[in-house]
Amino acid sequence: MAAALLPGATGAASADGPAAVVAVSVITRDELLAQLRAVPGVRAKYREEQHMALLAVPLVSTGTMHFAPSDRLAKHQLEPARARTVVADGRLRFADAYGRDEVDLASNPVVALFVESFLHVLAGDVATIERTWAIGFSGGADGEPQAWVLALRPRTEPATKLVESIILKGRGAKVERIEVRELGGDRTITTLSDVDVAHAYGEAEAAKVFAVAP
């Protein structure tokens, strides 16, 4: 296992020399995936920026994101307008002030590509991820032993026709940034904050969070 040597915050200086040095392990890909698999649930705030060639400024939305293993995901958009997107039971449901819509992921491979790839990463499901994506991993990003970068590059259609890469960054079991780079040059950057990876959704809470009607 790789290790980074950092000045020991708890090491005491001796009379004869400098403070002790503590070896800190750098997170590996297998350790990251194991940590993700152990997460009971995720709750976080998000800020999403859509950078599109046809627009002079990015489209920005904010809200909260919720994940319950292994296949339930919800985005509660608060700004610029309230909306909900919920993925559960193989379907994507959306609701806003103008109405509702529903997509069967099995019959829409393009939508399924983006939604299910993120779900599989959050669930630490490496076998399923590798069916569609080549995985690049770097631990110890920015000099922090638990910081990491996960780079997904498409191996199969429809991903090879749509996406250049999906780059995820985080610390430990926390995903903190997702950037989707499309072949046409458009990008979507999602930044997560106040990430709680110890949130277990009870039955009553899950019924509210993973429903399109608040």
Image (cartoon, rainbow, N blue to C red):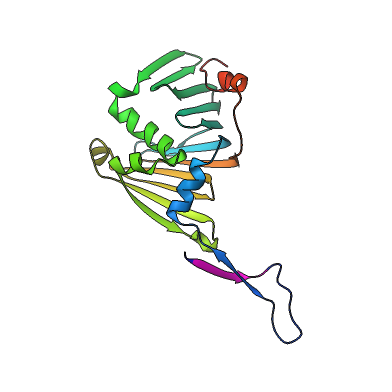
On the question of residue 82 being in view, the answer is yes
On the question of residue 184 being in view, the answer is no
The image position of residue 8, as x and y in percent, is 66, 70
Task: Establish if 76 lies above or below 21.
Answer: above
Q: Residue shown at 52%/18% (left/top)? A: 211
Is 104 on the left or on the right of 79, as rendered? left
Q: Is residue 113 magenta?
A: no
The image position of residue 188, as x and y in percent, is 41, 39
The image position of residue 152, as x and y in percent, is 35, 47
Q: Residue shown at 58%/19% (left/top)? A: 208
Task: Establish if 43 lies above or below 91.
Answer: below
Is 156 on the left or on the right of 42, as rendered? left
Q: Quadrant of residue 133?
A: top left
Is 64 on the left or on the right of 107, as rendered? right
Q: Residue shown at 44%/23% (left/top)? A: 88
Task: Establish if 90 lies above or below 6.
Answer: above
Which residues are drawn in magenta?
3-8
**In the current view of this chain or complex, which residue is farthest to the bottom?**
16
Q: Quadrant of residue 108?
A: top left
The image position of residue 90, as x and y in percent, is 38, 23
Is 64 on the left or on the right of 133, as rendered? right
Q: Quadrant of residue 24?
A: bottom right
Principal SS element in the magenta part? strand
Q: Quadrant of the C terminus?
A: top right
Residue in the foreground of this view, choosing between 201 and 176: 201
Residue in the foreground of this view, choosing between 73 and 82: 73
